Image: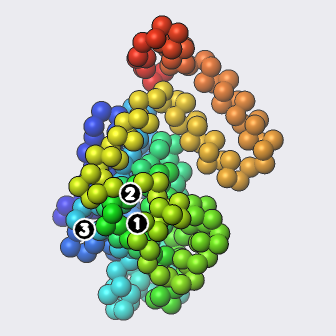
Amino acid sequence: MEPFLVVEREENILIARMNRPDSRNALTAPEYMQEFVDLCAAIRRDKTVNVLVLTGNGSSFCAGGNVKDMRDKSGIFEGSPAELRNQYRDGIQTIPLCVYELDIPVIAAVNGPAIGAGLDLACMCDVRLASEKAKFAESFIKLGLVPGDGGAWLLPRVVGMPRATLMSLTGDMIDSSKALEYGLVTDVYPSDQLMAEAMKVARSMAANPSAALRMTKRLLREGEHMRLSSLLEMSAAYQALAHNTEDHVEAVEAFLAKREPKFSGR
């Protein structure tokens, strides 16, 4: 069977495509969740990867859970309440823990509908770019469910609590223009230009010194929870490390010489 995530590489950028277009890239099997975990582990080990771009093959980004499996109480929705709880903890909840915590930037190129867990997956990424065909819904409530994969934590951090509350308690769909208005996505493009534009952003990020890139993302992540004084302390420590990298020295010399820098990742 083909992997759920088809991964390709362009220099120091990875592109991961969810590859079940016939099921709208629904997250239906434990193996799919494990592929996210394995990919993130591989990225953490490979310091030459600077950016990950995540998108979907076919007409959808990700449809979330499979509703037919919910009806049949099969697959990941099978079992007693205790078993289901553990399946969530050991299954889909592993995705936010690995994707959100990646040290490198993650760009979601949302090519089509991102529904339920699919929307939450997009919110785990650092930047969301959308096709004009993209649609978004925090739709769990429509099925008598709650966001089981961290959406109640992720969505308010992206769009703010009032809009997250509206989306979560109505479950209603919004289109790409409304998503842009909400700040859920930063830009909307014609569908045939989405990946090209996502790669432009990825290349712009990936061109920067890798140590500073990772530390900057970590500061942004930790800054969501820390007091200012604590973040300043962490920033001072990171800055001391950054000042002593070869890439910092090269960046300063290139700036003063008015030439393009050549970074080594050290």
Marked residue nearer the N-terminal end (2 or 1): 1
Query: What separation in Å lies between label 2 and label 1 (alpha carbons)?
Result: 7 Å
Query: What separation in Å lies between label 1 and label 3 (alpha carbons)?
Result: 14 Å
Q: Locate residue 156 relative to residue 33 in the image: left or right.
A: right
Q: Residue at x 53, y 65 (%)?
A: 182
Marked residue nearer the N-terminal end (1 or 3): 3
Q: Residue furthest top?
A: 257
Disc 3 secondary structure class: loop
Q: Indicate the position of residue 235 as horizontal and vertical percent values.
A: 70, 34
Q: At label 1, which amino acid type do we have?
A: Ser
Give above or below for 258 relative to 9.
Answer: above
Q: Residue at x 50, y 47 (%)?
A: 102
Disc 2 secondary structure class: strand
Q: At label 3, which amino acid type do we have?
A: Ser
Q: Indicate the position of residue 146 as horizontal and vertical percent values.
A: 54, 81
Q: At label 2, which amino acid type do we have?
A: Val
Q: Locate residue 27 relative to residue 21 in the image: left or right.
A: right
Q: Residue furthest left?
A: 1
Q: Which residue is mark 2?
A: 188
Marked residue nearer the N-terminal end (2 or 3): 3
Crowding around mark 3 (Cα neighbors within 10 Å: few <14, some 14 to 19, many 20+) is some
Q: Which residue is mark 3?
A: 59
Query: What separation in Å lies between label 2 and label 3 (alpha carbons)?
Result: 16 Å
Q: Which residue is mark 1?
A: 176
Crowding around mark 2 (Cα neighbors within 10 Å: few <14, some 14 to 19, many 20+) is many
